[in-house]
Image (cartoon, rainbow, N blue to C red):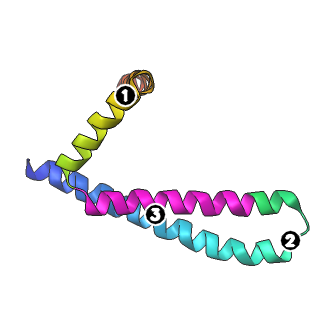
Amino acid sequence: MSPDAMKTINRMKESVSEIASRARETVRGSSGIHHVAKSSPSDEKLSEFTRDIAHKVGAAAGYLTRSDLNRMSRDTVRLCRQYPAQSIATAMAVGFLIGRMRRS
């Protein structure tokens, strides 16, 4: 693997880890708000939603931290085989977005 690719992967891992830590801080901060505004169901749902996002971002950061490019490649192939229609739709959407960005 080229040194540039490794640098890019390491930057991605750092970015996801930073996002996960910020999300955790947000959840900690929102828990105090949650206790104050306990009577409103929408605040409870917002707090739960924020916790779920923080958990998922943290899981993604952990995966990127402990996985190498070969493992990520195998996992991607496995997911594409398991969900072929969703994989094709995702590839088309990503291709469309990349095409739109290149035109701008």
SS of the residue under disc 3: helix
Query: Label 2 belongs to which residue?
Result: 37
SS of the residue under disc 1: helix
| Residue at 24% across, 59% down | 10
Measured as percent of width and height from the top left, residue 73 is found at 23, 41
- Against 80, residue 62 (above or below) is below
Of mark 1 and mark 3, the one earlier in the sequence is 3
**What is the number of the mark on residue 55?**
none
Q: Judge whether residue 34 is colored magenta.
A: no
Does residue 44 appear left or right of residue 20 in this picture?
Answer: right
CA gap, disc 1 and disc 3: 27 Å
Nearest the eye: 32 or 15: 32
| Residue at 53% across, 62% down | 55
| Residue at 47% across, 64% down | 20
Of mark 2 and mark 3, the one earlier in the sequence is 2
Specify the amino acid type for callout 1.
Ile
Nearest the eye: 86 or 100: 86
Residue range of the region highlighted in magenta in the rendering: 46-67
Does residue 70 appear left or right of residue 21 in this picture?
Answer: left
Measured as percent of width and height from the top left, residue 48 is found at 70, 61
Query: Label 1 belongs to which residue?
Result: 98
Specify the amino acid type for callout 2.
Ala
SS of the residue under disc 2: loop
Query: Label 3 belongs to which residue?
Result: 58
CA gap, disc 2 and disc 3: 26 Å
| In front: label 2 or label 1 | 2
